[in-house]
Amino acid sequence: MAPLLLLTGFMGSGKTTVGREVARRLGWGFLDLDRKIAADAQKDLPTIFAEEGEAGFRKRESTLLEEVVRRASPTEGLVVALGGGTLIDPANAALVKGRAWVVYLDIELEEAWKRVCRSDRPLAQNRKVFEQLLAERRPVYESVADLTISVGEGALDSASNQIVQHVRRGSEAGA
């Protein structure tokens, strides 16, 4: 098992929450890709989207992902909460293939919408667009994932447990 664990999934699936908990339990580092992009740009994500458009944001995202993968330590584990659209770019998906373990946190539309509908997320402002986006992204998430975990109301702790168990089993098998 590679010490680089990437969490992918749609908005509101709990990538950051689960990622922090998994990293804590494993004693690994944690990085939220969206937050790092905002910190590096010294702007929040809605401002980046407003000034640079989604294409500008995606360019920043791809550049940062490449840097994270390139700098990944073979001995020190890192959990990365990806943005919901990070692996939609085929180049990003190809970049992580075989270099990271990808966990897809699968969430149903209603639960995702409930979690993000009142947020300032640029791609969560219109229910119909949100629904279409999930329908488009779900097959990509499924195709890149090494493990899929369904998350719903109250399932984030269970998801963390499952991931930690898989990582530990993989580490024992590789030892």
Image (spheres, grey):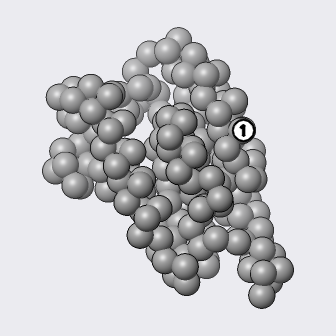
Q: Position of residue 104 (x, y in %)?
A: 67, 47
Task: Give the SS element for disc 1.
Answer: helix
Q: Is residue 35 visible?
A: no
Position above or below: 2 against 153: below
Along the line of sight, which residue is nearer the eye, 21 or 134? 134
Q: Is residue 40 visible?
A: yes
Quarter that holds the N terminus: bottom right
Along the line of sight, which residue is nearer the eye, 90 or 34? 90
Which residue extends farthest bottom? 175
Q: Is residue 68 left or right of residue 27?
A: left
Dot 1, how many residues are within 10 Å of its Cα: few (below 14), some (14-19), or many (20+)? Answer: some
Residue topped by disc 1 = 142
Q: Is residue 120 left or right of residue 85?
A: left
Position above or below: 39 against 87: below
Along the line of sight, which residue is nearer the eye, 119 or 96? 96
Q: Could you tell me which residue is drawn at 67 percent across and 44 percent down? A: 144
Q: Could you tell me which residue is drawn at 67 percent across and 53 percent down? A: 103
Q: Could you tell me which residue is drawn at 18 percent across and 44 percent down? A: 43
Q: Position of residue 154 (x, y in %)?
A: 68, 50
Position above or below: 39 against 160: above
Q: Is residue 69 left or right of residue 25?
A: left
Which residue extends farthest top? 128
Position above or below: 136 against 106: above
Along the line of sight, which residue is nearer the eye, 8 or 161? 8
Quarter that holds the C terminus: bottom right
Q: Could you tell me which residue is drawn at 78 percent across and 74 percent down? A: 170
Q: Position of residue 41 (x, y in %)?
A: 19, 49
> How many numbered circles are shown?
1
Q: Amino acid at mark 1?
A: Glu
